[in-house]
Image (cartoon, helix red, strand yellow):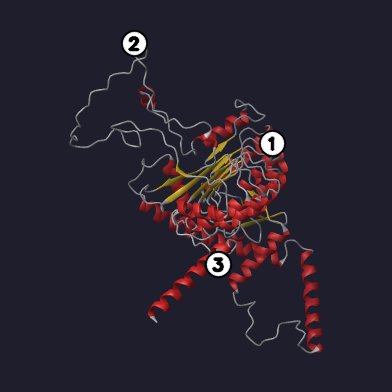
Amino acid sequence: MGKKLEKGLKEKNASAVSQDEENPNKTPEPYSCTGNFQADFTELCRRNSMTYIPPIIPRARPPTVMGHTESGKPDKGKGKAPQAPVEPDPDPEQDLDGEGIEAPPKTFTIKEKFEYFKPSVQVEMENFDKPDTVTEIYIRGWKIVEPIMEIFKQCWPKMAKLHTINLWNCGLSGEVITILASTITEIPEMRNLVLDGNTVVEENWHELMGEESPIQNLSLRHCGITDKGAEQIGQALGSTKRCNTKLISLNLSGNRITDVGAEHIALGLRMNRNLMSLSLASNFIGDKGASKIAEILSRFPLTHEEVVERRKHFSEKDFPERNKSPPGSRRDGSKDRPASVRSQSHMDKDKKGSKASAKKKDPKGKDAKEEEKHDKTKKKEKEDKTLTKKASIAADTKGTKGKGKGKDKTKQAAQEVEDLSGGEVVNPLTDVADFIDGQLWVSGNRVLINLNLSRNKIAESGMNNLLKAMQYQTTILMDNKSGGTGLMRIALLKNKISQEHEVMRKLNDIMLHKDPYYKQPPQTPDVQSTT
């Protein structure tokens, strides 16, 4: 009996194996990624029956000199390490004529023909002995289609240390951008995204700047972005309803943005108080676009929609439970209420509407005076809070004067913005407003600290408006820094105005001392004696 049972089990297993071999179209079990990018990517490509699987290789680095560290500085060890015995150089090879053959240099490696042009994925790793420590991914010069992007969508979210993705000249399409936008939201440490050299017809770059996007540094150089894409980017930066709170640096140089696109980006900067660096170099921006950007940097009047949102915000802040109704209650105008009650409520609304229309005739009526009074009270509270925070900052930084210039000054400015705002997202609609000629004027964007407008078409009129904006920022920052440090560096080279022009000289004089990289020239003995 035992031998017959074993024989039956063997026949059963053999028949199962033969059935699996006869059904090659049977769907395999879904593959779960492990975080090992090389193993996951190779397996998923094999399952998708790809004829060529791009290899995963370390990113090339320049050769290091013996006795020097990676930073190029010699080691400063106290004790000298024991030197290894020097081996004698081998005898040089000689040709048939007895002359020495020069040995090939050792600063590069020779590869097969056209191997350099084959697709590959270059990676940076924290530890090359651990394949799950990939931090940066670089893909250069080969087209990424949707199936490849779907594979990346499975691999990248499982990589715990990935923070940078660089896809240069990869022929991206609108569908691939959509897949990429949904992928970056699932990568835990994603921060930097570089997509230079990709011309997308749909120009749906705004999908990478959604509310859930973790991107802090976005580079879209030479992507053929027109005013259509700039309009969508401006709306993604900020509007009365929502604004991007993660993006810190945006590079749009080398595109086809004109005055119309610059105005849309400036509209996004009205409500955005998080972006600190913006590059619009090598575009087609003229005086109108530069003037619109200058207006956003100084001060601007609120539109009707923005005034409505401002009053809504104040009403919700002062009376947070006004719009909340208890369970089981009936709201005004509900269909469940009796007709007499509904008609009475409509009559009350009409009366209120007639009173409101009567008040609108007088721009400086009771509502305007109450709003102005509210702004004065809020301004005083904000100034007191700012003075307290300034005192604390001064106490913390006491004794550190003269240290931490250059890049540290930029970091200090960013830290001041975060400290003075209490670590919360600043809503410019709640800022102190001045009532001038029937309009509410608020201070402009002072969080942006770096602006690049080089190689555009800005003439004297646009430069003059930028000069007025910088003069206004300098004046207002003397009294209050609660809204930020203001623009600290601006690049305006190669526009339609000479650097020797009076407007440019005044603008350079203002910005020279605000530049974090500016170093005062050393004083000569003659200058010191006169002072």
Indicate the position of residue 369 as horizontal and vertical percent values: 67, 64
Front residue of 278/468: it is 278
Q: Dots 2 and 1: beta carbons under 8 Å?
A: no
Seen at 62% across and 64% down, the residue is 373
Residue annotated with mark 2: 98
Above or below, comparing residue 9 to residue 75 in the picture: below
Quadrant of the drawing holding the C terminus: top left
Q: Amino acid at mark 2?
A: Gly
Front residue of 497/224: it is 224
Per the rendering, the mark at residue 284 is 1
Residue annotated with mark 3: 19
Q: Secondary structure at mark 2?
A: loop
Report crowding for label 2: few under 14, some 14 to 19, many 20 or more residues within 10 A (C-alpha).
few
Front residue of 280/136: it is 136
Extreme residue toward the top, this view: 97
Indicate the quadrant where residue 170 lies. Answer: top right
Q: Amino acid at mark 3?
A: Gln
Q: Earlier in the sequence, mark 3 or mark 2?
A: 3
Seen at 81% across and 88% down, the residue is 339
Label 2, label 1: how far apart the Cα atoms are: 65 Å
